[in-house]
């Protein structure tokens, strides 16, 4: 090739590059299809990055593991030029904080996610929870397939099984992949990006209360976007405009000071399992309506726009009843989305004595129930706690917030210990806000599909700390709803994961 | 020594032997103090034999372990010239059967005991359940002391900790030691002895029903003596004239087909823990009175003599309330012994979801309760089971005796599986029978202390199979009541154990 031809080629390259840059500065309709092309071509690599992160155990109780996850995330973010720090919290589980400021951008989006996971009981899983296992479909009978090699295609129906595959590591990886997809076209996001990835969400976010106000300057943003939770059961792209609050309680009821032979003492020694059952039975009626005095009192009604959004949600109840073998749901015929707009009370665990092969004929010494209470806009977790205490006392119980002494147990006929673990309130961002409308438009552009707009997520998130900083919040979940979140065999449907990259790319390519 | 002196010594030996035999043929007042001397002098050896037996794990579920226990017992009995066989049962857990027939004896006593033990949860024990651990007193804080060497003295307050130390290996060893104590005086028992040591009592004796009628000829006896159970809480020597029947049930209540996130589905998906609590709450009132229709209907009233015996029992309720930190016992002020003369219903286990650190915010898929129902004379376990089923159905439940299919769960709003595990009826031997009076006299002679005569034991035993053979039954428990039977830290107070040897020796030295 001679010099003049070389020069021509150079000019041609320059011209092409300028054309690309020009397109990049252009319309989402031009950018977003190329995002799709990119993530299809690089599906295997994106998946490999997710799998590597999932191999790190991430139970909030294990600080060393948590630290390893935080370090891995930092490395992933720094590789992309995101200025990243591990910000300490009092619990020893750092917040992974990242910033990518874009010259000229006028909007700042703060993405929230978490890298810790729920506890696991490996024996209940069909593949080890921290060995990401790819299957050709849903369920343990679906064929296990190897992770694809670079450049190999990936099936939409494939599922990746691992703890946190859905909740909440895949959204973090999807966000970074969306950034890669834009940059592969030579463009940068059109918003300033901030990332706050927490390490103790599944432990109830006990230190955000202290962390967020302390870091208010760093966290300043126009919108907090929760990259967590499943899409609606209709599988449509979903935006939610709040999350419920939550409070968890442990109730321990006391019987004799040690387990006693049921033949010699049964129906003389008070049975704590029986007493606990009687207490729990007073808390709900047969339709699952909570019967605690004032439980539904403080609920702030939905706005006109929220009611409309709710009415537009595709019906899913019949198919859920079929899927989960439910003959008659609780809630007196109300739709699931309506129920989610109310507080709920759930018994998440019961323990007393032994069952199965270990069962033995004893009057147990104690019986324990674990409760979770979901809160909606208008509820306050401290007030709700007081209502529950008042209800328990009204049933004749003496309530302790610590282990009662034997002397106290000798004095009071019905003794219960009630422990409250953390708790925070709900947030509901008005859908009318301009930024809320911009968000809806961006997510719609990302997929071209009709959205489900939820006034609140059923799940909980500590959004109120941001609300107090004046930052409105909304959620953009991407994962399949049948992901076994919190349960054994947690899994991610890959079609959802990759659609999530499209959605996040559209958010990064924000239009004011 | 010359021949004449040798002859003199020979004559002296002969005379002494005759004197001993003459004493041996004489009154219990002469024999029994010597039994006491013997067991004091040989306390360490007797204890060592017990400890060796306790080192053999004996959970009924482990057939190899059970077999090892049976073989060990056979060897112990054969060493004493008891003709011993391991008689097979369909469950694979042999009955250790022994006979020692005494020429000229007119009465045959059949001793029943069992060599299997309740399940253990080693983490809840303060010393390993199958490493017998001697302590200078009661409770895990009492000093651990080594097992004494031969000839060394043994303290009455010492306790031996191990599974089955009280229930029921020590009575078996005490019986054999009583035989040794008589023979050390050159005498044999004055009754024919038969021994039936079972290997699945803690599993509900599922094969005695078939075994006992099949072996009716071998088992023929004038009285069955249960060498099992604790003495009365007053610590007085005790005879009981029956035992309660028992039936155990497992109730499994179904929620969604898999655990569901409580935020997305709580108070819509039926919560099985809540439903189970509501069901259990209908079964008893606040005073522990069972509210199942007809639960107390079939109870056969106590006889005059039984009521007298009951009235003579020393009061123990106050001290038990103090000991077990019970502010208000169930039973509306009735005495414990009166309550034991009634059927009882006990929740012995509850399981749903997870508790403690493992708790996670899910609607559980199932909830399980383990129940035991104790039966008294007049009750029938099959009839009682039907009453319970009728009660459950009356609360609107669809009952299955097997795992319901998903389709069945889709069809019925409240689905419960009720599994009945075995079950047998109570026996109460009339105290007026001459042989009952002889037994009382023999136990009184054994210790010189006033007896507690219980119309029935609170615990259960499959005595009805013997009743059907026309063999009356009674129980002679020897172990301390605070033995943690069935629970962690099961233990035997040595003073009780050695008094038990005196009592058993008195039974072997039976007076018609």
Image (cartoon, coloured by chain):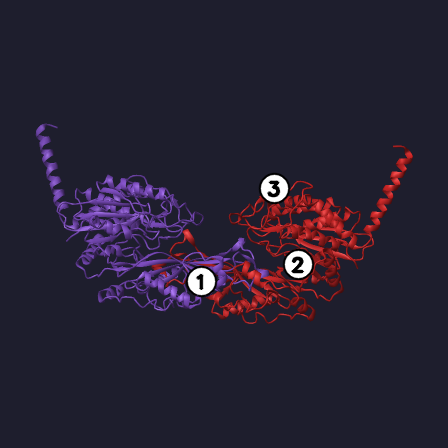
Chain colours: A purple, B red
Which residue in the structure is indicated by mark 3?
Answer: B146
Q: Quadrant of residue A266?
A: bottom right
Q: Quadrant of the N terminus of chain A?
A: top left
Which numbered tag is attached to residue A195? none
Crowdedness near tag 1: few (<14), some (14–19) or many (≥20) residues, C-alpha within 10 Å: many
Q: Is residue B395 above or below residue B216?
A: below
Marks 1 and 3 in Cβ contact (< 8 Å): no
Q: Position of residue A240 (x, y in %)?
A: 26, 58
Mark 1 and mark 2: span between their CA atoms?
54 Å
Residue at mark 1: B409
Q: Which callout, 1 or 3, points at the residue further toward the start of the chain? A: 3
User: Looking at this rendering, what residue extends furthest in the right direction?
Assistant: B4
Write down the residue under mark 2: B236
Which percent across, then down, holds residue B199? 64, 51
Q: Is residue B88 visible?
A: no
User: In the orientation shown, which residue stands out farthest toward the top?
Assistant: A2
Query: What residue is rendered at 45% in x and 48% in y?
Result: A123
Q: Secondary structure at mark 1?
A: helix
Query: In the rendered structure, the residue with mark 3 lies on which chain?
Result: B
Of B153 and A376, nearer the camera is: B153
Q: Nearer the viewer, mark 1 or mark 2?
A: 2
Left or right, residue A496 beside residue B363: left
* Mark 3 surroundings: few (<14), some (14-19) or many (≥20) residues within 10 A: few
**Considering depth in this image, is B335 or A194 the residue closer to the camera?**
B335
**Between marks 1 and 3 in the image, the one whose residue lies nearer the viewer:** 3
Q: Earlier in the sequence, mark 2 or mark 3?
A: 3
Q: Position of residue A230 (x, y in %)?
A: 31, 54
User: Are dots 2 and 3 on a single chain?
Assistant: yes
């Amino acid at each position: 090739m001679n010099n003049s031809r070389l020069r021509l080629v150079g000019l041609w390259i320059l011209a092409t590059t300028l054309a690309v840059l020009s397109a990049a500065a252009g319309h989402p309709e031009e950018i977003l299809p190329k995002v799709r092309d990119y993530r299809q071509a690089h599906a295997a690599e994106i998946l490999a990055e997710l799998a590597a992160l999932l191999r790190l155990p991430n139970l909030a109780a294990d600080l060393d593991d948590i630290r390893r996850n935080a370090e891995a995330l930092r490395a992933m973010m720094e590789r992309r030029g995101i200025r990243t720090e591990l910000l300490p919290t009092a619990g020893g589980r750092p917040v992974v904080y990242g910033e990518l400021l874009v010259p000229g951008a006028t909007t700042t989006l703060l993405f929230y996610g978490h890298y810790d996971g729920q506890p696991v009981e490996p024996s209940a899983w069909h593949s080890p929870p921290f060995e990401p296992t790819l299957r050709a479909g849903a369920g343990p009978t679906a064929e296990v397939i190897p992770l694809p090699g670079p450049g190999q295609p990936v099936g939409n129906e494939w599922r990746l099984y691992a703890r946190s595959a859905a909740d909440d590591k895949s959204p973090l990886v999807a966000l970074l992949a969306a950034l890669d997809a834009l940059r592969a076209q030579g463009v940068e996001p059109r918003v300033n990006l901030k990332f706050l990835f927490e390490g103790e969400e599944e432990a109830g976010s006990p230190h955000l209360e202290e962390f967020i106000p302390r870091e208010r300057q760093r966290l300043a943003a126009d919108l907090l976007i929760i990259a967590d939770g499943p899409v609606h059961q209709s599988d449509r792209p979903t935006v939610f405009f709040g999350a419920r609050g939550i409070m968890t309680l442990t109730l321990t009821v006391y019987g004799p000071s040690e387990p006693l032979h049921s033949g010699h003492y049964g129906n003389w020694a008070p049975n704590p399992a029986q007493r606990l059952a009687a207490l729990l039975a007073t808390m709900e009626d047969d339709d699952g309506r909570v019967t605690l005095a004032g439980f539904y009192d403080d609920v702030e009604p939905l706005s006109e726009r929220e009611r409309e959004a709710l009415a537009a949600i595709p019906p899913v109840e019949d198919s859920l009843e079929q899927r989960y073998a439910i003959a008659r749901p609780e809630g007196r015929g109300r739709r699931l989305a309506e129920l989610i707009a109310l507080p709920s009370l759930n018994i998440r665990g019961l323990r007393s004595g032994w069952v199965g092969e270990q069962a033995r004929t004893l009057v147990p010494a104690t019986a324990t129930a674990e409760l979770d209470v979901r809160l909606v806009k208008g509820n306050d977790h401290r007030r709700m706690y007081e209502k529950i205490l008042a209800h328990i006392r009204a049933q004749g119980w003496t309530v302790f917030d610590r282990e009662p002494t034997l002397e106290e147990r000798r004095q009071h006929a019905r003794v219960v210990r009630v422990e409250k673990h953390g708790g925070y309130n709900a947030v509901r961002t008005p859908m009318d806000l301009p930024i809320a409308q911009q968000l809806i438009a961006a997510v719609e552009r990302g997929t071209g599909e009709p959205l489900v707009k939820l006034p609140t997520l059923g799940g909980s998130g500590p959004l109120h700390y941001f609300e107090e900083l004046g930052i409105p919040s909304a959620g953009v979940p991407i994962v399949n709803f049948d992901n076994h979140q919190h349960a054994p065999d947690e899994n991610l449907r890959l079609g959802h994961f990759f659609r999530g990259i499209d959605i996040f790319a559209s958010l990064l390519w924000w239009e004011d």
